[in-house]
Image (tube, grey):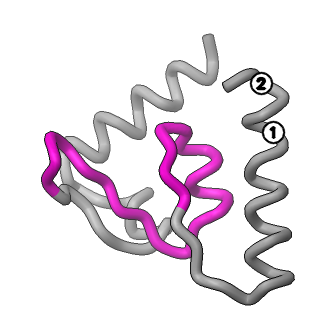
Amino acid sequence: LPISSTEVIPSFFLDTKKKLGITSVLVTHDMASAFLCADRILMLSHGHIVFSGTVEEARHTREPLVRAFLRSDILEDKE
């Protein structure tokens, strides 16, 4: 998605979730949006769940695949 879309979607998602009071699922590879929008995070690798927990738990997990993904996402944002 273009940068403008990735900036608008989290705002729209959060506003809609709050106004309607609904449970929602956001599928994304953008960890910044996921961490901003989510109450819980579920991460998959090759079709298998490798992590399920809160945003805070995801930030502090010892799961190697999750840690590697979070590091790669942070590095990509800085380039």
Residue 16 x %, y %: 80, 71
Neighbour class for label 1 at 10 Å: few (<14), some, many (≥20)? few
Q: Residue at x 44, y 73 (%)?
A: 54
Residue 50, image quadrant: bottom left
> Where is the N terminus found, in terms of image quarters?
top right
- Is there CB contact under 8 Å for labels 2 and 1? yes
Residue 42 location, quadrant: bottom left
Q: What kind of residue is marked 1?
A: Glu
Compared with 2, 23 (above or below) is below
Location of residue 11 with respect to 18 vertically, above or below: above
User: Residue 60 location, x and y as percent?
Assistant: 37, 60
User: Label 2: few (<14), some or many (≥20) within 10 Å?
Assistant: few
Instruction: Name the amino acid, label 2.
Output: Ile
The stretch in magenta equals 26-48
Give the Cα distance between marks 2 and 1: 6 Å
Q: Secondary structure at mark 1?
A: helix
Q: Which residue is mark 2?
A: 3
Horizontal side, residue 59 vs residue 44: left or right: right
Residue at position x 34%, y 36% in the image: 69
Q: Is residue 79 left or right of residue 13?
A: left
Quickly name the residue at label 1.
7
Q: Is residue 36 magenta?
A: yes
In the rendered image, residue 11, in percent from the top left (x then y), is placed at 83, 56
